[in-house]
């Protein structure tokens, strides 16, 4: 059988739906969507989404695995919870969107330079170092994520803001050196590592 | 005879009538103008003492005719229920004081109104007789149920449970009908989470065990003669033996037939054995015998199935059904769950446009289907390409793309068609078609008419009239079981597409209506909507010209013709609407308490002021079913009606005789407003055709007005619903304005 035929047969089969159900947080809810479109209509950022939630759910049922997981739509979610509040079927849509984003990240299918994905990674890396968020370094990482030249430009543009934050004691320049930490840093890192192991163990192979 | 009659009037002064009106004058009007032999006042006529006063007069003074001047005839009916006398009511409360403002300058016109209503009531009473049954009736308790499907079986069981013997006639060799061959059914009990056991075996057992039910298998009705309460029915078996039974009333539950999917070549029906209808899938599921469902072509276990919703229904395409079967979405969910139950990991997709899951548990069952991993895709299928694996081409309406999927089996969710007899009015539709296309359609329907089910020996044809798409006609909103043949009730999918639970509810309702009809017929009383009415039409044979108009125009096919062509009324088939009375060109048809004369006398006894008094008179003929109650409600709400109106309730606008219009105009009325129910396609007329007949007859009233040299605006006919509380009085007031504009009638003498 040619690849084309295989692809066609995979269409509208529930294999991807089953994968989502198994591997995506709250993914078992996707089959319960009744395609009313209230979520898409309620999303304040809806027009910036390539595929609004209703469409994502339909694409999952239609077996469009690559299209869904490499889409930047679920990264657009700002967790305003409008969709959850309004969904007549009670789907936790916000959580499903985050679950899909996490799964796409895990599989390395997240689009390059997706700002939310980039910020999330920087935030995570920053947090993992000391178990606490270092605001100064987080800000600087964001400024310089697109190279040194762009970083300087960003820093100059926000110079006033930075100075004011220091004056108001909202930011401490000394944080640049080391910075504050949780009491038991190695214990914290062990907890995270264990959690990641458990999570990875739950992922089922659908290849 | 005249000596035997004694007329008594009673004027109520309660509810503010005494304060607003001059009761003494009303009494004088009743005795002087109305020729009542006696007239009494009472401060609260509907009280126990008031009613007792009237009862005593009837008992002691041999009063035979009673005129009550109080509230509307629709109020206090229990109190003023005197069965042994002729009774009329002058409506002084809702008709006069509640619609007129309580001011000095209006006092005179208000009193005139009240006086007129008294005169009218008295005049009506003079030409009325006490209604009594014809004596032709008999009580036969047997109920005939036609059709042994789930509707018929339920109707039979319910009827027998109420203590009435049942004859259950089934054309085929076994009870069960369509549902009998199903694997499982849509659940009707909470928690609605899985297909339920087929109820037919349990019902069959119940029927077998019931000594009150006689089952006739392999049988049809070859003749149904008579009327409710005295039907004589020939039940003939396939082998030709005939049994004649006496029947009180009939339930027709002839069910439905599946849509012919051969009209769907685009879905490869007939080209591939693996394209089946929802009806055929049931057989596959039964044949699987608890194992996996196999596809017909090669016996392979089905691993993927696609359901195409609304195949050949809800569509304007040629050969498609324009309406939705109502149940096919639930059926597809049920059948998709068969695959989840029997075929394990089978992929099931339902392609729908609008998924409709009616009923108490419909939404729960839909959710149960989703939970079982049935995939619901909003998409419209355009083609099925046959092959080893079938390809379904469709438009995904959410993703907005033309796409396709492969599957082992395609199920077409096709619609239901009623299993009715031939429409008795098919020929009439051909004759009355307005254009060639309509005529061709009607002609095709006439030529492809199905065989008769009831074989009624009625002047107007052998079977129940149709409404739309071949379903039996019934008053859809208010009295769904009432067909246009009294004492014959249709139930189940022959009446409209419905699911099992609805059909069973329908069957129960129809069974109870049939029992009522048999009992009413036994007492000579009318069925719905004039339930209990004992009056029935009779005609003056010397005057009859055998024109047959009454026999043709009766909406209920009640009237047969004898050998000489005279009408035979069959009072137990009659609904007492009076459409025959309105039809009769020589005015020979009358009821004991309602006739051309009773209304004519009311019209003639309205006091018409001289032209220079500048007090117009407007005659309102209001249908007692909708328009008159609407006016009553308006009165309760305090909506004003102009003081020139004189309202006469009529049984149906269909009973309105053209002579009433002519006489009213000749007598000096300035305008006539007729109010009937909505007619034609989405009719609300309680007598189905009455309002439409009236509209047709009145379309010729222009000629009358021409001969009298009167303006056409003086006569108007309106469709009024019972909810038109603001509008109904407005229509009367509009006529007053019209009269003011065009001036008073010159016919004031």
Image (cartoon, coloured by chain):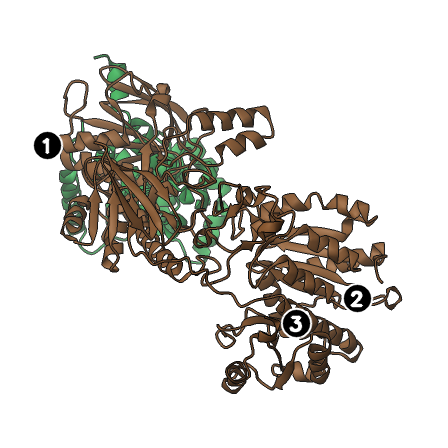
Residue A127 in the image: x percent, y percent?
Answer: 27, 47
- Rounded to the nearest whole Å, what is the CA distance between mark 3 and mark 2? 17 Å
Q: In which image quadrant can residue B53 be found?
A: bottom right
Which residue lies under the disc numbered 2?
Answer: B608
Dot 2 falls on a residue whose secondary structure is loop
For the residue pair A162 and B77, the one nearer the viewer reads as B77
Tell us which disc is closer to us: 1 or 2: 2
Question: Quick check: B122 above or below A2?
Answer: below
- Rounded to the nearest whole Å, what is the CA distance between mark 1 and mark 3? 80 Å
Q: In which image quadrant can residue B117 be found?
A: bottom right
Tell us which disc is closer to us: 3 or 2: 3
Q: Which chain is brown?
A: B
Q: Which chain is green?
A: A
- Is residue B257 in view? yes
Chain of the residue on which disc 3 is drawn = B
**Label disc, if present, on residue B122 of the rendered structure:** 3
Give the farthest residue toward the top: A2
Which residue lies under the disc numbered 1?
Answer: B291
Question: Quick check: B337 above or below B104?
Answer: above
Dot 1 falls on a residue whose secondary structure is loop
Residue B417 in the image: x percent, y percent?
Answer: 37, 34
Do marks 1 and 2 share a chain?
yes
């Amino acid at each position: 059988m040619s690849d084309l035929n295989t692809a066609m047969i995979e269409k509208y089969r529930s294999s991807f739906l089953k994968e989502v159900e198994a591997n995506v947080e709250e993914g078992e809810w996707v089959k319960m969507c009744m395609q009313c479109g209230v979520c898409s209509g309620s999303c304040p950022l809806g027009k910036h989404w390539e595929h609004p939630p209703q469409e994502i759910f339909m694409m999952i049922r239609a077996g469009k695995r690559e299209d869904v997981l490499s889409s930047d739509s679920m990264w657009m979610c700002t967790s305003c919870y409008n969709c959850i509040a309004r969904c007549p079927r009670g789907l936790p849509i916000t959580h499903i969107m985050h679950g899909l984003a996490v799964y796409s990240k895990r599989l390395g299918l997240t689009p390059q330079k997706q700002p939310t994905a980039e910020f999330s990674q920087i935030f995570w890396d920053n947090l993992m170092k000391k178990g606490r968020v270092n605001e100064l370094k987080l800000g600087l990482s964001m400024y310089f994520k697109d190279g040194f030249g762009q970083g300087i430009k960003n820093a100059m543009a926000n110079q006033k803001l930075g100075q004011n934050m220091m004056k108001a004691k909202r930011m401490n320049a000394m944080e640049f050196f080391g910075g504050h930490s949780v009491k038991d840093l190695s214990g914290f890192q062990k907890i995270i590592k264990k959690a990641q192991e458990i999570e990875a163990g739950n992922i089922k192979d659908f290849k | 005879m005249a000596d035997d009659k004694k007329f008594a009037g009673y004027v109520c002064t309660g509810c503010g009538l005494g304060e607003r009106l001059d009761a003494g004058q009303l009494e004088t009007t009743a005795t002087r103008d109305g020729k009542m032999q006696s007239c009494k006042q009472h401060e609260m006529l509907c009280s126990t003492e008031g009613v007792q006063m009237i009862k005593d007069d009837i008992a002691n003074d041999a009063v035979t005719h009673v005129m009550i001047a109080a509230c509307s005839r629709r109020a206090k009916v229990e109190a003023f229920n005197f069965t042994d006398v002729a009774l009329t009511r002058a409506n002084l409360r809702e008709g006069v004081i509640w619609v007129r403002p309580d001011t000095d300058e209006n006092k005179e016109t208000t009193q005139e109104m009240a006086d007129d209503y008294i005169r009218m009531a008295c005049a009506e009473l003079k030409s009325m007789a006490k209604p009594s049954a014809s004596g032709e009736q008999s009580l036969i308790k047997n109920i005939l149920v036609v059709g042994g499907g789930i509707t018929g079986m339920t109707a039979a069981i319910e009827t027998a449970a109420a203590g009435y013997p049942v004859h259950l006639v089934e054309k085929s060799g076994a009870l069960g009908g369509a549902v009998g061959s199903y694997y499982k059914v849509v659940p009707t009990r909470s928690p609605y989470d899985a297909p339920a056991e087929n109820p037919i075996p349990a019902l069959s057992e119940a029927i077998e065990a019931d000594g009150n039910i006689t089952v006739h298998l392999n049988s049809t009705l070859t003749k149904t003669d008579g009327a409710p309460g005295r039907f004589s029915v020939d039940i003939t078996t396939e082998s030709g033996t005939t049994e004649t039974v006496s029947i009180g009333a009939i339930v027709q539950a002839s069910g439905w037939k599946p849509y012919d999917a051969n009209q769907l070549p685009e879905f490869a029906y007939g080209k591939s054995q693996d394209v089946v209808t929802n009806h055929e899938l049931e057989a596959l599921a039964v044949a699987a015998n608890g194992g996996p469902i196999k596809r017909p072509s090669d016996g392979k276990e089905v691993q993927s199935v696609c359901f195409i919703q609304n195949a050949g229904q809800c569509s304007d395409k040629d050969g498609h059904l324009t309406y939705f079967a109502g149940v096919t979405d639930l059926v597809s969910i049920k059948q998709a769950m068969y695959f989840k139950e029997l075929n394990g990991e089978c992929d099931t997709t339902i392609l729908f446009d609008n998924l409709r899951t009616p009923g108490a548990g419909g939404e729960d069952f839909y959710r149960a289907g989703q939970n079982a991993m049935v995939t619901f895709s909003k998409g419209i299928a355009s083609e099925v390409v046959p092959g080893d694996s079938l390809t379904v081409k469709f438009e995904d309406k959410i993703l907005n793309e033309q796409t396709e999927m492969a599957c082992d089996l395609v199920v077409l969710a096709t619609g239901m068609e009623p299993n009715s007899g031939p429409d008795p009015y098919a020929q009439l539709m051909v004759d009355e078609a307005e254009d060639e296309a309509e005529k061709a359609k009607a002609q095709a329907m006439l030529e492809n008419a199905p065989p008769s089910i009831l074989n009624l020996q009625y002047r107007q044809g052998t079977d129940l009239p149709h409404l739309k798409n071949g379903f039996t006609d019934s008053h859809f909103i208010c009295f769904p079981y009432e067909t246009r043949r009294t004492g014959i009730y249709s139930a189940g999918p022959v009446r409209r597409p419905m699911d099992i639970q609805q059909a069973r509810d329908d069957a129960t309702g129809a069974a109870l209506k049939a029992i009522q009809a048999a009992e009413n017929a036994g007492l000579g009383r009318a069925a719905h909507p004039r339930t209990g009415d004992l009056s029935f039409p009779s005609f003056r044979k010397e005057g009859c010209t055998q024109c047959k108009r009454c026999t043709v125009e009766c909406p209920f096919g009640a009237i047969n013709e004898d050998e000489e062509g005279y009408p035979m009324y069959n009072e137990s088939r009659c609904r007492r609407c009076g459409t025959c009375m309105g039809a009769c060109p020589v005015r020979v048809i009358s009821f004991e308490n309602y006739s051309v004369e009773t209304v004519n006398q009311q019209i003639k006894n309205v006091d018409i002021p001289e032209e220079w008094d500048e007090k117009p008179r407007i005659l309102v003929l209001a249908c007692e079913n909708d328009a008159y109650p609407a006016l009553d409600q308006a009165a309760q709400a305090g909506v004003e009606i102009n003081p020139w109106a004189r309202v006469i309730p009529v049984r149906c606008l269909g009973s309105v005789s053209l002579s009433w219009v002519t006489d009213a105009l000749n007598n000096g009325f300035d305008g006539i407003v007729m109010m009937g129910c909505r007619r034609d396609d989405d009719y609300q007329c309680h007598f189905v055709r009455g309002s439409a007949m009236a509209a047709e007859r009145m379309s010729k009233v222009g000629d009358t007005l021409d001969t009298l040299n009167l303006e056409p605006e003086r006569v108007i006919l309106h469709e009024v619903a019972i909810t038109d509380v603001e509008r109904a009085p407005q229509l009367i007031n509009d006529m007053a304005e019209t009269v003011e504009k065009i001036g008073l009638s010159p016919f004031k003498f």
